Amino acid sequence: MRTLALVMAGGQGTRLHPLTRDRAKPAVPFGGKYRIIDFVLSNLVNSGIYSIYVLVQWRSQSLIEHLKDGWQFGGMLPDHFVIPVPAQMRMGETWYQGTADAIFQNLNLIDDTKPDLVAVFGADHIYRMDIQQMIEFHLDRKAAVTVATLPVPVEEGNQFGILDVDSGLRVAGFDEKPPAPRAMPGAPGQCLASMGNYLFNPDVLREALIEDSIKDGSHHDFGRDLLPGLITRVPVYAYNFMTNTIRGDSEVNLSYWRDVGTIDAYYEANMDLRDARPHLNLYNPYWPLRTAYYDQPPAKFVFDEGGRRGTAAHSVVSEGCIVSGGSVRNSVLGRSVFIHSYSAVEHSVIMDYVEIGRHARIRRAIIDKNVYVPEGEEIGYDLERDRQRFFVTESGLVVIPKGPKRERSVL
């Protein structure tokens, strides 16, 4: 069975501002060396799905460059590809008006590929999933549409599409971001949420998209329009993500899924990586997390003298980093970060090519790429002062947006 994957990567990600000021949300760095989109692409490739179109739109240059650098299979096998597809107005005179409209405007990709199954997946979540297990569920149920789902607390249900299902997991109702979500029978306090990942039989998807495109008042959205309209016409099933297993993972890693749609959620997901037994295990050789390859040297820690010792504890440190007589604790460092002597970084996410000067102190901060932190600077210690200069969340996270490219210091 040949599965064609259409990855939705065109959203603005406004709640992640200022990290999305210059890039699409799926292109935001994560976990030191990766990008958010690497998770869905790794899930697809590790699941044996190699025909992948990535639909881009909003400030997509950074994302397109990342796909070019890290996700090209070469031309030996024509059905093995990861290809970015910019909005082209093939079916009208507007940009994408919704998730369903994005697929409708690219129906030619489905028609040309002639797949047995179409996987429509989002590009902005942090998780690992064996998609073949979802496909097996879809085939066993003889479904026309399958929606990946997981339980969430009722108080968070207004952020998701909420499903009602029968005892066989056939969907009987779908309500997009309801103000008062319904709890699942037998599970008080929990409701069943859509993960925004779908499997479609191609003919069902094609007919539904064409019908939706001419429907007055439609938002042209999968959750608001397409899925509720299909429930009474074709068999739509809910796949329980909680049953999905990955070889090599332990129980602590099962069913890890994070919507990193806000600064605080993004920060917490990065912090999940630091533990000795992390909830998201990046070190499982059976399910590698793939990304662009960068030819950079190993990280190093230099100087070992009183008051000037390069150290990192309970942290993730990427290649090319130099911790030169400074200290790093409970943090995630991207590629080629330079920490100068006598400086201290704690509980922070520091992205690629950041340079932190001597005697600087950083606490509970997210610092985007190419930023230079001057000698003696303090960030995260006086939030009122930080608010005058940077973006500060209600929880007290200080976010410094991307800086201009600059020459880095030498040791």
Image: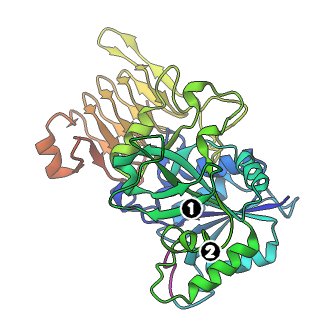
The image shows residue 361 at horizontal and vertical percentages of 25, 30
Q: In which quarter of the image is residue 255?
A: top right
Question: Does residue 362 show up?
Answer: yes
In three-dimensional space, the C-alpha distance between marks 1 and 2, rounded to whole angstroms, equals 24 Å
Q: Residues within 10 Å of mark 2 (few under 14, many from 20)?
A: many
Q: Which residue is drawn at 32% across and 29% down?
A: 345
Q: How crowded is mark 1: few (under 14 residues within 10 Å), some or many (20 or more)?
A: some
**Most common secondary structure along the magenta stretch:** loop
Q: Quadrant of residue 327?
A: top left
Q: Which residue is drawn at 44% across and 45% down?
A: 152
Residue that mark 2 sits on: 103
379 versus 248 height, above or below = below
Image quarter where the C terminus lies is: top left
Q: Residue 172: which disc?
A: 1
SS at mark 1 in the image? strand
Task: Tell me: 6 left or right of 16.
Answer: right
SS at mark 2 in the image? helix
Task: Tell me: 160 left or right of 386.
Answer: right
152 versus 50 height, above or below = above
Closest to the observer: 344 or 251?
251
Query: What amino acid is at disc 2?
Result: Ile
The image shows residue 66 at horizontal and vertical percentages of 59, 56
Closest to the observer: 371 or 117?
117
User: Which stretch appears magenta?
Assistant: 94-98
Image quarter where the N terminus lies is: bottom right
Q: Do the residues labelled 1 and 2 touch (CB within 8 Å)?
A: no
Q: Of callouts 1 and 2, which one flags the residue occurring earlier in the amino acid sequence?
A: 2
Q: Which residue is drawn at 37% across and 20% down?
A: 325
Q: Residue 97: say if magenta.
A: yes
